[in-house]
Amino acid sequence: MRIIVYGFRPKTKQRRSVFDALLRCTKPERVWDLYTFACGPSKFGNANPKERLLNEYFRLLGRSSLRASMDMIEDGSFTLENELWRISDLNSNYNLCQTYPFAFMVPKSISDEELLQACSFRAKCRLPVITWCQPGSGAVIARSSQPLVGLMMNMRSNYDEKLVAAFCTQLGANKGERRKLYIADARPRKNALANGAMGGGSESSSNYFQSPIVFFGIDNIHAMRESYSRLRDYLDMHGATSSDGRSSFLRHTGWTWGGGNLSSMSASVSLLGDSGWLIHIQNVLAGAAWIAARVAVESASVLVHCSDGWDRTTQLVSLACLMLDPYYRTFAGFQALVEKDWLAFGHPFSDRVGMPNISGSGNFDLPRQSSSAGSYPSSPVRQSTQSGASQSSSSSHAQNNYSPIFTQWVDSVSQLMRMYPCAFEFSPTFLVDFMDCLLSCRFGNFLCNSEKERQQCAIAEACGCIWAYLADLRSRATTSHVHCNPFYDPLKYDGPLLPPAASLAPTLWPQFHLRWACPEEAEAADIEVQCRAMRVKYSEMQKDKEATERRVDEISFAMESLSAELLRERRMSWSARESAKRATKEYRALTRAVQSLGCKVNFTTSDVEDDPRTSSVENNNNNPRRRDRQGNNSDVSVSISLMSEENRSENQVGRVCEALCPLRTREGVCRWPEAGCAHLGSQFVGLKTNFDAFDRLSIQESYFKSE
């Protein structure tokens, strides 16, 4: 949708060389000439897509705990099953159908021999297979190509009818009642009848268990291509910026629009309707919503097909799965959905995007309409008698297979996101970047036309992976990335999305279609950007809050530790004071006792230096050495000597003892003066020489009266 104009200075000879270079880059002859092969090895490695496909099959079968591996693929042990469905490896070598994946899900009651017989009755051998099954109820969405019933619709296949009937399993509540099956034909009825002339056509409800046939009326790829071309020209003509320099209301900022009056505005708006793009989007949305409603409300099974079963069929089944299964509305689920229904089941991306395929032929011919308003052909909806857009372009239909089918589907997804802004994990910006990555040819996921061709070209090994690149972008900013939807509410939208018909009126996808023609109006996600900025700010504040709370917890823990230590110190201080009081009382009691013996007690201290070799021994042996208040080491020595006569005479207790002592003579002289008092000394042996005896001496306070 972006139009770039090159300007050259006069008298220069660069136009031809630039034109040839652009032509060479935009229309490469071989698939190996594409940019993804020329840009060198990518750091975004591509894991085997077959493993991811099997993992999705395991999830649908209720075996999510199993993980696929290359060994499982090589030895064929991936053919698991449940009570209703199974995984078949009949197409492991792509012999059954070259555009189908190597493995697909079919009813358990159908054998491989019956599948071989049934595939020949469908165009391109694309037989009916299961693309999604509802857990618990047994309802399925199946896909296929058109049946080869012929012009008279009289061709039948018993194997095909049996395969389709196997989708009508019994209802869980009523064992005797069979499930209803709808056959949804994405084409207009007249197109289906026209295909009967070439051997195709549509089913007869009488041959398929009275299954009703519903036609959705979605046009073919050629109508979509012409509609997209008219949409591009409309935006280029009436946008804020234009490649031809035409004036517009936005550029003139006046009451005229496009150089005319207000009626010209109405005329230009009708041109948007004449493009038919929004009508096609609405038809796809309505068809997918109808399929989702039949499965969710009626628990019915639906078989969807168009002509070949890889364009309109893929649009409908993938969009219906997106509505039914909340898993597909996540990043991982969206990847699984695209890889399953678009890549594995053979949507021809090379032909539709305009890239060369494996055979070397590529085409990209988007017809350019005239810039005048009168050149627009009438809307496809208003053409009641005409078929297609114009007879002049019918000759190019067979040669040009380009069509914006996948772009149309992503546009439909954006319409769902507009209706349910809180149901998707990803944002509209993710869809825009996803489309840019697809069209940039930087990655190899969407090259070639089928899984078989990508395997032949070794795309997974040689090219980078778009999913790994997008996941790497999100990993840098987690939930604050622009690809993440800030309004996502998985708890509220954990079931199917069933939009009513009144809400299926689409609008232009501004972020994608208007970003070049109307860049200011394309910023329709301002609220989302502001909300994301607020979430980033809130996340930063939350981190600061958590860091502050951790700091507060650390400080609180430190304060508790200090409080506990202070309490222990107070208890030790109180215990020390009590011990000091007891020691003082004992000291006074001992002093009086010793003085009663006529002795005098002297305490002396002498400072000494610590000997590191003996300090530990002294502390362990209760050495009388102590520390003074200044922390210095000191020796405490005690000397006990006899009191003088004057002091003794003053001691009343001593006089009593002298009077009663048997060792004293009549003259008052001690017969054994050097031995001390033998009578009392016998009770305090070693008092003069062993100070440690005082430490072992137990004296209770009750022994002495208060002073």
Image (cartoon, helix red, strand yellow):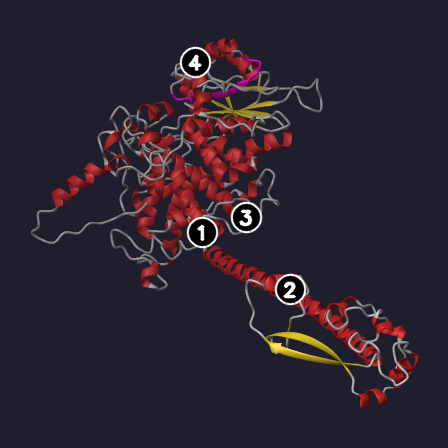
> Any mark on residue 619, and which?
2
**Nearer the observer, disc 1 or disc 3?**
1
Name which residue lies at 50% across and 47% down: 418
Which of the two discs, 1 and 3, labels the residue nearer the N terminus?
1
Q: Are marks 3 and 2 in contact (CB under 8 Å)?
A: no
> Any mark on residue 150, and which?
4
**Nearer the observer, disc 3 or disc 2?**
2
Between marks 1 and 2, how big is the CA–CA gap? 64 Å
Inspect this view and state whether residue 373 appears: yes
**Nearer the observer, disc 1 or disc 4?**
1
Residue stretch in magenta: 99-110
**Residue 31, image x, y percentages:** 26, 30
Q: Are marks 4 and 2 in contact (CB under 8 Å)?
A: no
Which of the two discs, 4 and 3, labels the residue nearer the N terminus?
4
Give above or below for 558 relative to 380: below
Give above or below for 113 relative to 482: above
Q: Left of 168 or right of it: where is 232?
A: left
- Amino acid type of the residue tagged 2 in the rendering: Asn
Label 1 sits on a secondary structure element that is helix
**Nearer the observer, disc 1 or disc 2?**
2
Q: Which residue is mark 3?
A: 488
- Amino acid type of the residue tagged 4 in the rendering: Gly
Quarter location, residue 607:
bottom right
Which of the two discs, 3 and 2, labels the residue nearer the N terminus?
3
Inspect this view and state whether residue 508 appears: no
Between marks 4 and 2, how big is the CA–CA gap? 113 Å
Q: Residues within 10 Å of mark 4 (few under 14, many from 20)?
A: some
**Residue 543, image x, y percentages:** 53, 59
Name which residue lies at 48% across and 45% down: 426
Label 2 sits on a secondary structure element that is helix
180 inside magenta stretch? no
